[in-house]
Image: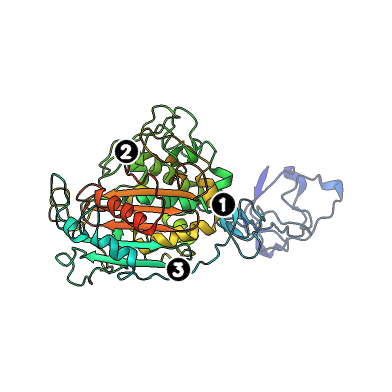
Amino acid sequence: PVTMDVPRDTGVVTPDVPVTMDVPRDTGVVTPDVPVTMDVPRDTGVVTPDVPADVPQDVATPVDVPPVDVPSVDVIPACAAGETRCASGCVDLMTHVANCGACGAACATGRSCVGGVCQALPVPYTCHPIDGSTWAPIVAMAGNVATRTLASIMAAFPNANMRPTPGLSVAVREADGTVHTAVFGNAFNTAYDASAPPLSPSTLFQAGSISKPISTLAYLMSDFADATRDVDIRPAIATLLVPPYAVSPSDLLSHISGASVHGFTGYAPGLPLPTLDQIVLGRSPANNLAVTFSSRGAWLYSGGGIILWQDWLERRIHEPMPTMVHDLLFVPASATRSRYTQPLPATEHDAACGSDPILLPGICRNVYPESAAAGLWTTPADLACIAGYATTERNALTRVVSRTILISGYPQVQGLGFRHRPANGVDETAGHFYEHGGVDYGFCSQLAFFSDGRAIVVMDNACAGDTGLVVTVTRTLCVNLGWTCSGVNLAAH
């Protein structure tokens, strides 16, 4: 190959750069219409397109090649955890009414989506408590509680401690829906909150273990409960813990799962609060032992099992349990004061303080993050309204009595949430009877109601005689009303 420097004025069209050409030395000047980048013999006669002189020889020039359109690819962002991409975008199949349980599975108008199951919206229920302070059965109770006046028992409950009970709140619901309310004493809260109003039927009390059947009742109000209450929960909680045998929501709610941890003591205000997972695992800042399992079948009261159920439930329905209870139970039952809020906001002044110098030294109340087991704030009036509403939703109570677990030495059998039995202890001629009690530090409560909507609720802010005062008042009201409240007992609160 020969490299030639060809001057511009020779008339030969070539680029202003040295050109390497595979031609013999004696051929002379290369004609301009033969591309110098092609190894073509001189005598081929091949005609090539004209190349402009200002195009560098080493740049390939396309010949009549149309541009190729490369379509752009839209990058579809991933959906957030717990969401699925449907035609309308990323949705939560557990709560989305247009995609309930599966993309395109829309709930009918007037239905909601709970846990991926279309659910009929609750029918509003009207409940308007009235002042019952002069109502004869309540007046009679105040004058004679187990041969003593209520005031004298509240001044010093007859037990070893002889401690006083600052306040007591009562509600009685008649079968016709009338709710009578009355309060005695004070809320014991002015020392902690200068804005606290006097004790009234709207004053909130901690409900202790009544939290359990109320959260259960809301779950049983849903069609989601029918689809899940007998399933094995282990796949849904596999990342948390795995019980050594199949455990269902019904097992946990009827206390036959073999789960440990009887109850919870709460946390002083200002202390760090644990998550549900930390409570189940017994990890700091939780102050309880880890939930473990022994054997399934026998009744073993377990607040730890209820918290495991709440943890499972929230993983399945993709919303907090308190939200479900609010929507499915509190709102339709007109339970306007009830909430699973721990701790209460500083703006809530109408709430009692617990009186217990040993368990609550200088403290108004403990905080209970164990919502489903012990975290309910409510009033006797609200619980009476809830009892009335539950008797209008027959499916829920049918689900409650689907379990009849014997409790040694106890007059009721354990159902889902509530304990229950025929009201007269024999048959259904006097209706069915449901009950549960509750204890948080400084607070005791008792709820009892019948299948026809009659109900008695008593709450105090001392728990001076364990549950003695609230149970005694409940029994006294039953007698004054002529009701058969067979076996009101808090042997396992």
Q: Quadrant of the N terminus?
A: top right
Q: Label 1: which residue? A: 395
Mark pair 1, 2: CA separation: 29 Å
Q: Secondary structure at mark 2?
A: loop
Residue 127, numbered label: 3
Mark pair 3, 2: CA separation: 34 Å
Mark pair 1, 3: CA separation: 20 Å
Which amino acid does the dot numbered 2 rest on?
A: His
Counting residues from the start of the chain, the first of labels 1 and 2 encountered is 2
The answer to whether 185 is drawn above or below residue 274 in the figure is below
Which amino acid does the dot numbered 1 rest on?
A: Asn
Which amino acid does the dot numbered 3 rest on?
A: Cys
The answer to whether 295 is drawn above or below residue 255 in the figure is above
Residue in the foreground of this view, choosing between 388 and 49: 388
**Is the residue marked by circle 2 packed among few (<14), some (14-19), or many (20+) residues within 10 Å?**
some
In the figure, is residue 493 to the left or right of 452?
A: left
Q: Label 2: which residue? A: 262
